[in-house]
Image (cartoon, helix red, strand yellow):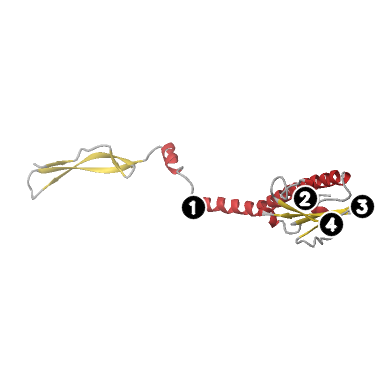
């Protein structure tokens, strides 16, 4: 008599636990004594639902990542020009402060003499305090003066308001602005440049 029996239990295959149950089959071979063949059938035992959920939560898919990147790009495309415009407007105050300092220094200089002076005469540097504008005294005489502030560095991208001009003629003060030294902006753009 021959006996075949596989008694292994609880093997782990591909993440699933299998349980094997012995089966006994009786038969005969060529009319002789009966042969007991004990084979094992396997049936899968699934992992609990909580364990399967832990395995499913692994990370981001490529599509999710691309969606987030594209949304961030769209928001940046909208927000960056607005931010840069506001930054340029804020930097323009650097030129306005410089112009007011020049105006005060010119009046002090004129009160001690017969005419207005150059930037060197009045002791004013040729650069604004934060360094965003360079200053030039285009003319200075007994009646008045003209000071031009020209944007430098990254502020030079402020196209319409790149040049700001302050002109004092007697008791009249005029403000002008423009993309070049001619400072010929129309009045609405000029008001925007000077924050008036």
Q: Is residue 156 left or right of residue 60?
A: right
- Give the mark, 2 or 1, whose residue is nearer the N terminus: 1
Residue placed furthest toward the left = 32
* Mark with earlier residue (3, 4): 3
Residue 80 percent coordinates (x, y)? 66, 52
- Residue occupying the point 38% across, 39% down: 47
In the image, taking residue 113 as reference, residue 70 lies left or right, namely left
The quarter of the displayed image where residue 149 is located: bottom right
Residue depth check, mark 3 versus mark 1: number of the one nearer the observer: 3
At numbered mark 3, what does the secondary structure look like: helix, strand or loop?
Answer: loop
Q: Quadrant of residue 33?
A: top left
Viewer-closest of 15 and 30: 15
Crowding at dot 3, Cα within 10 Å, few <14 / some 14-19 / many 20+, comes out as: few
Q: Which residue is mark 1?
A: 62
Q: Nearer the viewer, mark 2 or mark 4?
A: 2
N-term-proximal mark, 3 vs 1:
1
Q: CA distance from mark 2 to mark 1?
A: 61 Å
What residue is pinned by disc 4?
188
Q: From the image, tell me which residue sits under label 2.
A: 119
- Which quadrant of the figure contains the N terminus? top left
Circle 4: element type: helix
Q: Residues within 10 Å of mark 2 (few under 14, many from 20)?
A: some
Q: Nearer the viewer, residue 10 or 185?
A: 185
Q: Which numbered mark, 1 or 4, is in the foreground of this view?
A: 4
Residue 170: assigned label: 3
**Label 2: which secondary element:** helix
Q: Is residue 92 visible?
A: yes
| Residue 8, image x, y percentages | 22, 38
SS state under label 1: helix
Between label 2 and label 1, give the one nearer the viewer.
2
């Amino acid at each position: 008599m021959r006996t075949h029996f596989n008694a292994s239990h609880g093997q782990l295959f591909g993440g699933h636990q299998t349980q094997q149950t012995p089966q006994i089959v009786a038969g005969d071979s060529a009319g002789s004594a009966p042969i007991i063949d004990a084979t094992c059938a396997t049936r899968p035992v699934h992992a609990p639902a909580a364990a399967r959920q832990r395995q499913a939560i692994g990370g981001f898919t490529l599509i999710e990542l691309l969606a987030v990147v594209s949304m961030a790009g769209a928001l940046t495309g909208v927000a960056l020009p607005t931010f840069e415009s506001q930054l340029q407007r804020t930097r323009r105050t650097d030129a306005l402060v410089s112009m007011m300092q020049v105006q005060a220094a010119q009046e002090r200089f004129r009160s001690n003499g017969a005419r207005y002076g150059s930037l060197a005469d009045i002791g004013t540097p040729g650069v604004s305090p934060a360094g965003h504008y360079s200053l030039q005294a285009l003319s200075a005489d007994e009646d008045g003066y003209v000071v031009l502030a020209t944007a430098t560095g990254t502020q030079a991208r402020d196209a319409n308001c790149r040049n700001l001009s302050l002109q004092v003629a007697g008791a009249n003060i005029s403000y002008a602005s423009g993309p070049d030294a001619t400072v010929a902006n129309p009045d609405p753009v000029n008001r925007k440049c000077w924050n008036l």
